[in-house]
Image: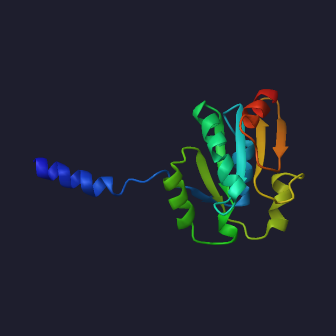
């Protein structure tokens, strides 16, 4: 019996992974951005190859742990259509925030539909207060404590 439990733990434990990221299209992302039961929603656009993006990920994880809804939108599929690299990154970093991979290949067709102020540079963050309709857009890397400050202003 002990042997059976050990084998089960070994087999099933080795298949447990961190959360998997959903692959979404622009319409899915727009729906995600516009319909939320949460008052505040932080949406961060990032990529595994973007150093400033990776540096600020802990700030998003911190506010997510405090109860703010955070969605991390990976832009990796534009350069590499294989999502495995992102899945491994999520697991290695232990990300707990919701992660989606945007599957759109032509930035010129979707950037302005996400936010008119966005040039397409990474990282970029949108903070939405769904109860007031107010939005804050930031197209640069956030510094420690800055995300909490922006959340308090909205």
Q: In this view, does 59 lie above or below 10?
A: above
Q: Which residue is at the front of the view, 140 or 24?
A: 140
Q: Quadrant of residue 59?
A: top right
Q: Which residue is at the front of the view, 55 or 101?
A: 55
Q: Is residue 67 above or below residue 58?
A: above
Task: For residue 46, say whether it is visible.
Answer: no
Where residue 133 appears, x then y in whole percent? 83, 34
Q: In the rendered view of the protein, which quadrant contains the C terminus? A: top right
Q: Is residue 143 above or below residue 78?
A: above
Question: At 35% across and 57% down in the image, what residue appears?
Answer: 15
Question: At 77% across and 57% down in the image, what residue appears?
Answer: 122
Question: At 60% across and 51% down in the image, what residue appears?
Answer: 99
Q: Which residue lies furthest to the top in this view?
A: 152
Q: Name the side, left or right, on which 96 lies relative to 70.
A: left
Q: Name the side, left or right, on which 23 lies relative to 51.
A: left
Task: For residue 125, say whether it is visible.
Answer: yes
Q: Which residue lies furthest to the left in this view?
A: 1
Q: In which quarter of the image is residue 105?
A: bottom right
Where residue 138 appears, x then y in whole percent? 82, 46
Coloring scheme used:
rainbow
Q: Which residue is at the front of the view, 105 or 17?
A: 17
How many numbered callouts?
Answer: 0
């Amino acid at each position: 019996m002990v042997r059976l439990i050990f084998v089960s733990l070994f087999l099933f434990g080795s298949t447990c992974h961190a959360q998997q990221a959903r692959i979404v299209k622009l319409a899915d992302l727009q729906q995600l951005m516009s319909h939320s039961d949460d008052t505040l929603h932080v949406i961060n656009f990032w990529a595994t190859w973007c150093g400033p993006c990776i540096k600020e990920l802990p700030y998003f994880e911190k506010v997510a742990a405090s109860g703010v809804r955070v969605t991390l939108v990976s832009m990796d599929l534009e350069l590499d259509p294989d999502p495995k690299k992102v899945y491994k990154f999520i697991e290695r970093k232990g990300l707990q925030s919701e992660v989606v991979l945007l599957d759109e290949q032509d930035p010129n067709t979707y950037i302005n539909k996400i936010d008119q102020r966005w040039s397409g540079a990474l990282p970029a963050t949108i903070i939405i207060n769904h109860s007031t309709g107010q939005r804050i857009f930031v197209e640069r890397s956030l510094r420690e404590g800055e995300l909490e400050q922006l959340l308090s202003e909205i």
